[in-house]
Amino acid sequence: MISEFLASPVMREALLPALLVAFVTASMSVMVMAHRLSFLTVGVSHASLAGLGLAVTLSLPLLPTATVFSVLIALLLALMPRKKGISEDAGTGMLFAGSMALGVLLISSTNSARVDLFGLLFGNILTISPVDLHWLYLMSSLIPLLFVLAARAWWSIAFDAVTADASGLPVSALRLLLYGLVGLTVILCVKLAGIVLTAGLMILPAACAWFWGRSLFSLWLLSLLFSVTGAMAGLFFSYIYEWPSGATVVLSLCTLFILSWGLNWAKSRLTA
C-alpha cells in the first residue's frame, strides 16, 4: 500500500505542498498556543471566506486576495481598542460572523460552476493549481523566515509582556507582526484543510507537543514531528480509503493528540 501511495502521480504532486503546510503550521502553532490565539485562528479562517468571495465575484486571484483580506482582519483584531469594553474574543466573534456572512452572500451571487464550495470549506490539496503552488512556495518561505527572526521575542512576550516591554522590546509592533503572520498562515492552510478545518492545523501540532516539550526549541521540534506525521498519515489514509484529504489530516492530528494525552496521563500515574 505504501508503494502504491508513493507511486501515485496525484499523491506525489500533493506530498510536497502538504509537507510545506505542515512545516509552516508547526512553527506558528507554537506561538498560537503560547499567546492563546486559538479562537483568533478560528475567526480569521472563517473570515477569509469573505476574501475568497470577493476574489470570485471580481475575478481576482483567489489566494492573494484572500491573503490580503485575512491579514487585514487579523491586524484589525490586534488594533481593536480593549479599553472601550470590546474584548478580543468578542471582536473576533463579530468579525468572524460578519465576514463569513458577507462571503456566503458574495459566493451565492456568482456562478456556482466557478466555485468549488466543498474545496473552500474543507480543503482539497489534490486539486492545487500551478498558481496556487507558486503562492504556497512564496508564503512557506516568508513565514518561517519571519518566525525565526521574531520567535524568541514572541516567546518572551507570551509569558511576561510587561518585562519584555521594560527590556526594550517593541511589544506592540511584534504583536501586530504575529497577528499578521497568523492571517498569512491561515490562507496557507485553506487548500489542505479548508476554511472550516484550518484551526486544527494551527492548534493541534503544538497541543500535542505541549505534553512533552518545555523550551521553545523542543516544542518547535516536537510540533514539527507531530505536524509532518499527521500530514503524511492523513494523505496516506485518504488515498487508501478515498477520504477527503483535509479532514483525514486533521483527524490524524486529533488522534495524535489523544495518544499524547493518554501517554502523558499514564506516565504521570506511573511516576506518582
Image: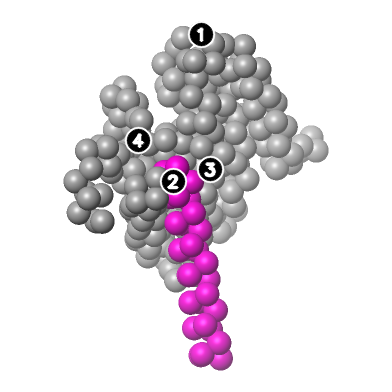
Q: Which residue is mark 2?
A: 243
Are the residues at dot 2 and dot 1 in contact (C-beta closer than 8 Å)? no
User: Label 3's element?
Assistant: helix
Label 1 is placed on what type of residue? Leu
Q: Position of residue 65 (x, y in %)?
A: 47, 19
Kindly identify the residue that appears in the image at 57 percent across and 57 percent down.
160
Circle 3 crowding by C-alpha within 10 Å: few under 14, some 14–19, many from 20: many
Q: Can residue 266 be found in the magenta stretch? A: yes
Kindly identify the residue that appears in the image at 34 percent across and 47 percent down.
239
Kindly identify the residue that appears in the image at 58 percent across and 17 percent down.
107
Q: Which residue is mark 3?
A: 197
Q: Which residue is mark 1?
A: 58
Q: What mark, if any, has residue 126 been given in the picture? A: 4
Kindly identify the residue that appears in the image at 56 percent across and 51 percent down.
35
**Label 3 to label 1, Cα distance in Å?**
26 Å
Circle 2 crowding by C-alpha within 10 Å: few under 14, some 14–19, many from 20: some
User: Label 4's element?
Assistant: helix
Q: Residue furthest top?
A: 58
Residue 20 or 27: which is nearer the viewer?
Answer: 20
Label 4 is placed on what type of residue? Leu
